[in-house]
Amino acid sequence: MRAGPSQEEIRRHNLGALLRHVHLGGPTSRAELTSRMGLNRSTIMALTADLTAAGLVREELPRETGRAGRPSLVVRPESARVYVFALDVGVDRLVAARVGLGGTVLDRRETVRRRGPFVMEEVVGPLAAFARQMHRKTRPDTVCVGAAAAFSGGVAREDGVVRFGPNMDSVDVPFGEEMARRLGLGLPVTVGNDANLGAMAEHTRGVGVGCRDLIYLHGDVGVGGGVIVNGALLGGHQGFGGEVGHMVVNPKGRSCGCGSLGCLEAEVGERALLEAAGRFENHGAQPYNGSNGSNGSGALIGRDAVRAVVDAADRGDIVAQAALGRVGDWLGLGVANLVNIFNPEMVVFGGTLREVYLGSAAQVRSRITTDALPPAREHLRLRTSALGDDATLIGAAELAFAQVLADPLEVLARAGS
Amino acid sequence: MRAGPSQEEIRRHNLGALLRHVHLGGPTSRAELTSRMGLNRSTIMALTADLTAAGLVREELPRETGRAGRPSLVVRPESARVYVFALDVGVDRLVAARVGLGGTVLDRRETVRRRGPFVMEEVVGPLAAFARQMHRKTRPDTVCVGAAAAFSGGVAREDGVVRFGPNMDSVDVPFGEEMARRLGLGLPVTVGNDANLGAMAEHTRGVGVGCRDLIYLHGDVGVGGGVIVNGALLGGHQGFGGEVGHMVVNPKGRSCGCGSLGCLEAEVGERALLEAAGRFENHGAQPYNGSNGSNGSGALIGRDAVRAVVDAADRGDIVAQAALGRVGDWLGLGVANLVNIFNPEMVVFGGTLREVYLGSAAQVRSRITTDALPPAREHLRLRTSALGDDATLIGAAELAFAQVLADPLEVLARAGS
């Protein structure tokens, strides 16, 4: 109910909108920008000139138009020059990447994370070292315009503190603050829930482009969710929205790390699948204590273990097939509930749920048919993540770019100074 | 990613914003509008002059300011002159009202609806007759600017067709089209799901004013839901979003009208409560076939029956207390799931769920404590509907006003011609 925007706000909006076009859509001709943005040619020229002067885009002749007449100049993001740091803190792994404007991954480092409680130094240490290594390799004229991290846990919008992360015993962790201090770039590190960022990534660059109502389900050790409602990420009152893994689907079911019984995570997460397949080995109080890929006794854990079950089922292993059938049934019930609640256009299975879905699609679909209201499911599309294991990382990069896309010249002036 | 708005769009936006201010906030001084809308005094004066000339608002001296100096004129909606028709199609009742700009109910008619399958004439007939009666009583200078209906069923956004309504056996009912034809006002009748409209009503005029993330749960025969996400109603891809009553909470539970087992509606709806309280009587295939208030054998049904159980529990009836305890436990589980999924600021219990919640608040809260993630529930407020049985009707009125608030002068010109 506020008044309309000022001329200065409109200009800032337009600069951001143009930059977002080439950031998400890649090199775009002036003519196309003119028609897509509904502005006249001279405005597009002026906006492009401002962004070019700031070093955010450059204009060049298109390669080959095949048409007569003077070709329209193509506006291209300065991917090699303007970049962000994207970080991903999973239960099993730590990833850092340098991502250029336009979404190009310019450099990337990854290491395994030993399962167990969160220890700040064991996470920020390796990630800061990765960032330093990558930073040293950049040319002098490059400029870092942001940094953000995906974290396997619930992140408060207000202060970026990780308020819960049952699978890493993490409670009230001021991760962003500490990470920013250790990066030492003079930039804040924005933190987001990994599944929320995966949803944003699939929505902007993955299988869900053009889809305004989308649910992304992310399997790691647990099950996370990110929900896009009418084109925007569902955050809720404090930013904890989308925790669909803790929707109870089986009130007399398996116990969950959150303390409840029968959460979706407890019924379809890694442990549920491995136990049902007779491939889970518990070593004392910590459910997992080996290094990644296998536990102390040599049994596989993590993504490798989930993939092994799906592979075994493919080869005809009846126990593995039954395990996938059971998990697929609960997964289908969870999705049916979400279909009734959100009426999404698409549900995307990412992380280890990609494999689980591929191995149990019949059960998932059958359960949706039984339990979702027909009109709510009739146009539903079920898809697997297009960005694979890096969906959450790409989402973190998009979070890091958010500021420069909102106010390109201001952020660049700050970053350059 | 479109360009900024034109001057004409800004003016239209500002006219709508000013009208919305006085529509929702009541008479407001020019000075207050100036500060709230962030516009200068001369712009507010010009906008007010335009709205006054169109007969949408009028300016007058405030009653008594108690302050020295020239008082700021108060802008007041023309409630007696500009109105909409609001309709409410419940399983048990039909309501029509004439609601003035500003939300004043100017006239209202209600009749019972016999439970059973939806028959078009039995619904549009009485509602059209009510509208005619009310229309005949209006002064010649009044103007109707819209009409809308709340319907107990899932309504497609695209064409306003009621696609499902298990409690009225209604499938693919073009209710809005037929209702508009019968009203004969030359106005379309916009149709919305009753619980969605209840959510909008509580958000704009009820207990949830100022609350950007709110869930409204509506108990009728079944259980409907409406979800406000970041200030806007969750519609989903086709408009069926918010059907939280068909979230399965007890997969081996009671059978639901939708064909599933253990939906929230099946566990906490009217029939679940009455059966648990030993007060349900089934007469053949139709679960209900008496007139409203009681069935053939004299047992109460509907709101009266639900209230009777709560009253009995209050008076110490152990069976009624146990029934409420059981239903409250499932209701709490459903709310806990929604808290994890949406991280809402407030959950509002409306319709018969108002009574159910008041009679089982301890169980509801206990279950939320067990099953909702602590950070997601720590600021949660549980409330009962402020608008009572008319929440859905008031929501229909707001839906009917939506057009005139979006483009005041255009809609009024059309209505007056």
Image (tube, coloured by chain):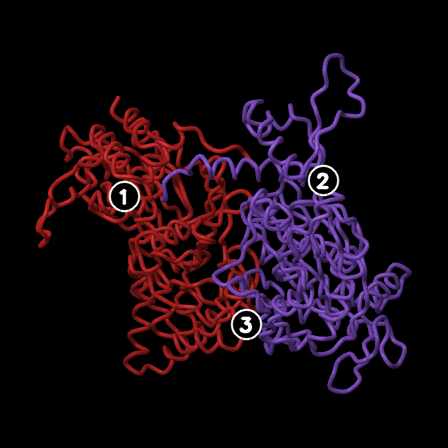
Chain colours: A purple, B red
Q: Is residue A10 left or right of residue B353?
A: right
Residue A80 location, x and y as percent? 76, 44
Q: Nearer the viewer, mark 3 or mark 2?
A: 2
Residue A236 location, x and y as percent? 50, 59
Q: Residue lying farthest bottom?
A: A284
Query: At 75% across and 69% down in the image, what residue appears?
Result: A270
Residue named by callout 3: B373
The chain letter under disc 2 is A
**Three-letter code for the amino acid on which mark 3 is drawn:** Leu
Q: Nearer the viewer, residue A339 or B254?
A: A339
Query: At 29% across and 57% down in the image, what residue appears?
Result: B387
Q: Is residue A71 left or right of residue A180?
A: right
Q: Nearer the viewer, residue A209 or B245?
A: A209
Residue B180 position by quadrant: top left
Residue named by callout 1: B34
Cα distance between the residues tagged 2 and 1: 43 Å
